[in-house]
Image (tube, helix red, strand yellow):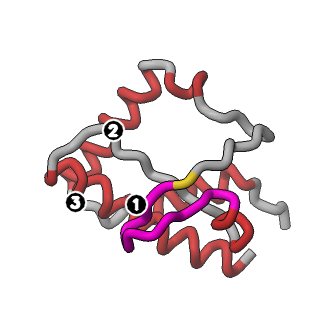
Amino acid sequence: MVETSFIDKLAQLRATSCQDLPTPELAVLTRTTARLRRCGILNKCLQSGETAPDFSLVNADGENARLYDLLDRGPVVLNFLGVSGARFVVLNLRPMQRFSRNLIAWVATT
């Protein structure tokens, strides 16, 4: 049996996370992803093998969360919302919550 690559596993995880999304939410997610790709943001992102700089943010519980402290406990997924508005936030958080649950389950099995 051929071992599935990390990229393939992420693609499977994305498909699993998106399959139950209502059509409007999936459309927003797809359009937003395409727009980000077209604007060249991928060239500005960390590339494979590069180390993210340490930083701190206030988490949803109002506590200070430092990236490197979180990484000591396991993988970290960050989702930055670049716009405001309740509808946009809700549409982005639902897929991210599904993705996070699937990622946690996947990490537990590897």
Residue for point 40% across, 60% down: 96
Question: Which span of residues is magenta-colored?
Answer: 57-68
Callout 3 crowding tier (Cα within 10 Å): few <14, some 14–19, many ≥20: few
- Distance, label 2 to label 3, CA atoms, is 22 Å
Tell me the element at label 1.
helix
Query: What's under tag 3, amino acid-wise?
Result: Pro
> Mark 2: few, some, or many residues within 10 Å (few <14, many ≥20)?
few
Identify the disc placed on residue 82: 2
Residue on which the image places disc 1: 96
Instruction: Answer with the quarter of the image where residue 44 lies.
Output: top right
Q: Which mark is in front, 3 or 1?
A: 1
**Secondary structure at numbered mark 2:** loop
> Mark 1 belongs to which amino acid?
Met
> Which residue is found at the position 42% from the left and 46% from the top?
80
Q: In which quarter of the image is the C terminus?
A: bottom right
In the image, residue 38 sits, relative to residue 77, either above or below, namely above
In this rendering, which labeled residue sits more in front, label 2 or label 3?
Answer: 2
